[in-house]
Image: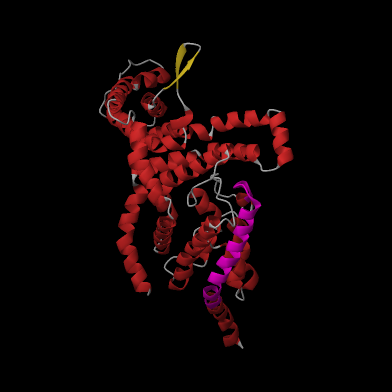
């Protein structure tokens, strides 16, 4: 069995490594991950505005607090695509060795140029304005595609020497500002051409085209429990052969999962039904309880049921981090990598927890998650409460117990083996 795992490692490693090292995927993942604090602020504001408690709602409405919370929501989660294109474009340029914020700024310019203007008429006067419609979750895929395109093109043009070179003695800040002038003109011309092309189609804008032909189908496919289970299987299989499988999975799936979560967040804020179940919030809240492999249950078994000193000590050392979803001590201390005994529960546990949580949500035992993207390190129960309901936190506790039940027979064998190894020297001495 060990031979087979090593053979699998040799076959999978090159493919998985290529995904992990892909500059385009890396710039997207880093850009979207950097948005988490903004999304969390918006999510907390959404939660505070919509707490389902009548006296509280009367208070926030009568005092005007609700109105100000809405403003905060509008300029955090409702402009997430606009913020994202800056980070992704800048990140893409950096991946190709051109570290200039100008790449991100031209990404924002490109996004705004390609965003259709809305028209309002009042008292015989006509005014154009940019609607929030495409600035939030609906425009996320345009933000990603445009960010990659602008960042890569900017880096390419700079590396080809299409920059204005200032004479010696000019301050570096002035030199840098002029360096992006020619790439900026070229990017602007390309973007304007794209705008003209799409305005002369039935879609009217690149936003409508991308949303109809790319974002909606991908969300429909990536938002199913079957796709989620498949991603979890592959991610945890990669862990077994020594690769951080979740990093690979998140780098590919983050755009889809984030768009689904943001749609839920918008629906929650508007008081509408939340349609999406799997997503990044679902992953962090239900699937990875204790980290990859949902090892918090295993951690608790080590803490309370271990006979061997090895696992007792490991359980004590790892429990604080495990509650916060960090489980490298468990993964490398057990160990999980290339360990046939732990392979089965390590793969099956997160899948089973995901299916149970999905069913519980689908039949109404718990509400759908509001889509708040919790940063790594948010403790269990706290993360559940921040998703909008105490029932979510209770389900987390139930899932941890279930994970312990799944891990128990495999842990028992590993613990017995470790215990026997510890007592052998004592038996020989006696």
Q: Tell me where residue 414 appears, x and y as whole percent.
A: 52, 75
The single residue placed furthest to the left in the displayed view is 160
User: Where's the C terminus, which quadrant?
Assistant: bottom right
Residue 336 shows in this picture: no
Task: Give the tally of numbered discs.
Answer: 0
Q: Is residue 418 magenta?
A: no
On screen, residue 268 above or below 428 = above
Residue 363 as seen in the image, left or right of residue 180: right
Residue at 54% in and 76% down: 409
Q: Nearer the viewer, residue 297 or 160?
A: 297
Q: Nearer the viewer, residue 23 or 381?
A: 381
Quadrant hosting residue 325: bottom right
Q: Tell me where residue 419 appears, x and y as whole percent.
A: 57, 78
The single residue placed furthest to the front in the displayed view is 124
Residue 422 shows in this picture: yes
- Secondary structure character of the magenta stretch overall: helix
User: Where's the N terminus, which quadrant?
Assistant: bottom left
Residue 48 as seen in the image, left or right of residue 103: right
- Which portion, as a residue range, is magenta? 385-413
Q: Tell me where residue 49 appears, x and y as whole percent.
A: 64, 36
On screen, residue 118 above or below 213 = above
Q: Tell me where residue 168 appears, x and y as whole percent.
A: 34, 16
Residue at 37% in and 38% down: 211
């Amino acid at each position: 069995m060990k031979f087979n795992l090593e053979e699998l490692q040799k076959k999978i490693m090159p493919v998985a490594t290529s995904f992990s090292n892909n500059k385009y995927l890396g710039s997207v993942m880093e850009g979207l991950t950097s948005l988490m604090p903004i999304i969390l602020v918006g999510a907390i504001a959404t939660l505070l505005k919509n707490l389902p408690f009548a006296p509280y709602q009367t208070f926030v409405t009568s005092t005007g607090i609700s109105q100000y919370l809405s403003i905060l929501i509008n300029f955090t989660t409702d402009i997430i695509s606009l913020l994202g294109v800056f980070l992704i474009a800048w990140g893409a340029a950096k991946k190709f060795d051109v570290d200039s914020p100008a790449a991100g700024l031209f990404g924002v310019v490109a996004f705004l140029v390609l965003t259709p203007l809305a028209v309002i008429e009042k008292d015989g006067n006509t005014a154009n304005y940019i609607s929030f419609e495409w600035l939030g979750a609906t425009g996320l895929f345009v933000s990603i595609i445009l960010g990659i395109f602008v960042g890569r093109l900017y880096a390419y043009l700079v590396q080809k020497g299409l920059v204005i070179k200032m004479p010696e003695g000019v301050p570096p800040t002035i030199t840098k500002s002029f360096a992006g002038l020619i790439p900026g003109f070229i990017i602007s011309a390309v973007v304007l051409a794209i705008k003209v092309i799409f305005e002369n189609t039935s879609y009217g804008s690149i936003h409508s085209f991308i949303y109809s032909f790319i974002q909606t189908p991908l969300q429909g496919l990536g938002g199913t429990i079957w796709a989620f289970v498949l991603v979890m299987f592959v991610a945890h299989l990669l862990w077994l052969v020594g690769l951080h499988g979740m990093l690979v999975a998140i780098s590919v799936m983050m755009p889809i999962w984030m768009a689904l979560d943001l749609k839920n967040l918008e629906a929650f804020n508007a008081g509408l039904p939340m349609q999406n179940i799997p997503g990044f919030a679902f992953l962090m809240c239900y699937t990875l309880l204790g980290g990859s492999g949902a090892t918090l249950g295993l951690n608790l078994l080590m803490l309370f049921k271990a006979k061997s000193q090895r696992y007792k000590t490991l359980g004590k050392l790892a429990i604080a981090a495990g509650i916060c979803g960090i489980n490298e001590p468990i993964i490398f201390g057990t160990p999980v990598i290339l360990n046939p005994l732990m392979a089965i529960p390590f793969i099956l546990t997160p899948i089973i927890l995901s299916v149970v949580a999905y069913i519980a949500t689908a039949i109404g035992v718990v509400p759908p998650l509001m889509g708040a993207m919790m940063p790594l390190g948010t403790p269990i129960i706290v993360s559940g409460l921040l998703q909008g309901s105490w029932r979510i936190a209770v389900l987390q506790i139930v899932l941890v117990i279930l994970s312990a039940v799944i891990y128990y027979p495999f842990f028992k064998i590993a613990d017995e083996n470790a215990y026997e190894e510890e007592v052998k020297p004592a038996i020989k001495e006696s």
